[in-house]
Amino acid sequence: MRGATSGALVLLAAFATRLAGQDPRLAARLDPQTNVVVGAIIDSARTAKLPTAPLTDKALEGWAKGGDGTKIILAVRQLSVRLAHARTMLGTTSSADEIKAGAGALDAGVSARDLARLRTAAGKRSVTLPLAVLTDLVGRDVPVATATNLVVSLARSHVVDSDLTLFQRNVRLDIERGADPSTAASTRARGLILRTNTSGNPIR
Amino acid sequence: MPENDELNLEQISRELREPVALDASFDARVMAGVRGLPRHVRRGVWSRLTTPRTVKVRPLSWAALAAALVFVAGVAALAAYPSAGEVSRRPVVALFQPTPRAPQRVQFVIVAPSARKVAVVGDFNGWDPEHAAYQALHRGGGVWSVTAQLPAGHHRYSFVVDDSVWMADPTAPRAIDKDYGLPNSAIVVGGSTQ
């Protein structure tokens, strides 16, 4: 009976994979039961017009990190929820990269409301890199509120991506040298905003 | 006076009602006169087009004709070259999008003096530690590196040392991973322009 059930699931998974154009790597790496559930979550996301590649990647990441089926299913489902929240707060015209970065920021502890603040501050410019930098700051123990306010201010000042990358690197180096994370981030952000606002051509 | 007028009118009308006597040669003289007129020739389209004629046109009409010609030429040019507008916008896009959205070569570097094997795994290679294109080479002094072509976009990745130890890229932004509990890094390839 159990063998028949597993066989049916394998057939169902293979059929679903072919039907939905699911990534064949999922069927190859995940156990049949996990693959069916993950496939269903991805189908739901596709129906909701959410980007599905991050969900596939999350499942493959779980496989690579040795996670069991339950953990992988939970991770994929939670990511789909975060993607939906991120899309709602960033706007339906946001790119897949922005939504993915937004989901990452939510996972780091940034509030949905702050995603909307960043979107408003950036206007029509992409928030992918600002969100990645925000997530990094939080990961380096800059308080969420401080990190969010700083990145929103940088976006409002029209800081370009290359300067934002430089900002992230400088803050990381300051922290590695022993600076307080919050102080390092605030100081670097203030300097960058000052230079951007006065010259429009920040010093490298 | 009115009586005289009525008499005059009556006399005039009586005179007019009198039949007019025509001589027998009248019809012949009329027809001879008609035959003496130049013969009417039915001209064809070609004859109408090739016969020189004088045309008078107001300057305003010439201006209207010129404007119509310019309009028609513009419409024809747009129809023949539908991408003409895009071509003119390209330099502007290039100014504000210095980082192309095409795949870019990215170098991953990590210092792992005691490692025997280092691989890069991430969204770009299905998190496959055995992916041949993402196996780092030992450059000496404990430095391992690999350069790979990455598609544009936001990617999460990590180093896998000796098939067992997961290490975030110390020089890259951190990507929080509460799901599986192992460190990841983030990279945005091709800038974050839309």
Image: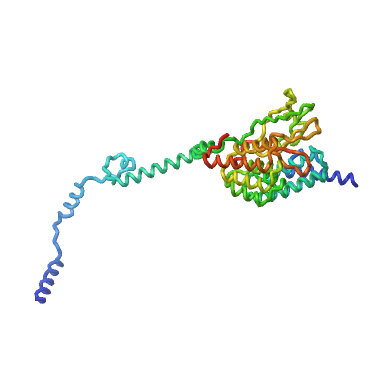
Q: Nearer the viewer, residue A115 or B101?
A: A115
Is residue A62 rendered to the left or right of residue A128?
Answer: right
B84 above or below B60?
A: above
- Colouring used for the render: rainbow
Residue found 74% across the figure and 23% down from its top: B141
- Work out whether B30 lies above or below B99: below
- Do we see residue B186 in this rendering? no
Q: Is residue B60 above or below residue B5?
A: above
Tell me, yes or no, if residue B147 can be seen here.
yes
* Image spot of residue B121 (x, y percent): 74, 34
| Number of numbered labels in the structure image | 0
Extreme-top residue of the structure: B140
Give percent across and percent down for residue B137. Answer: 74, 25
Residue at the image position 75 percent from the left and 36 percent from the top:
B127
Left or right, residue A75 beside residue B28: right
- Residue at the (37%, 44%) spot, across then down: B67
Q: Which quarter of the rendering shows the C terminus of chain A?
A: top right
**Front one among B72 and B186:** B186
Image position, residue B28 (x, y; %): 17, 52
> Along the line of sight, which residue is nearer the eye, A25 or A103?
A103
Residue at x 67% of width, y 35% of height:
A173
Task: Tell me: A163 left or right of A67.
Answer: left
Residue B130: quarter of image: top right
Q: Position of residue B31 (x, y in %)?
A: 19, 51
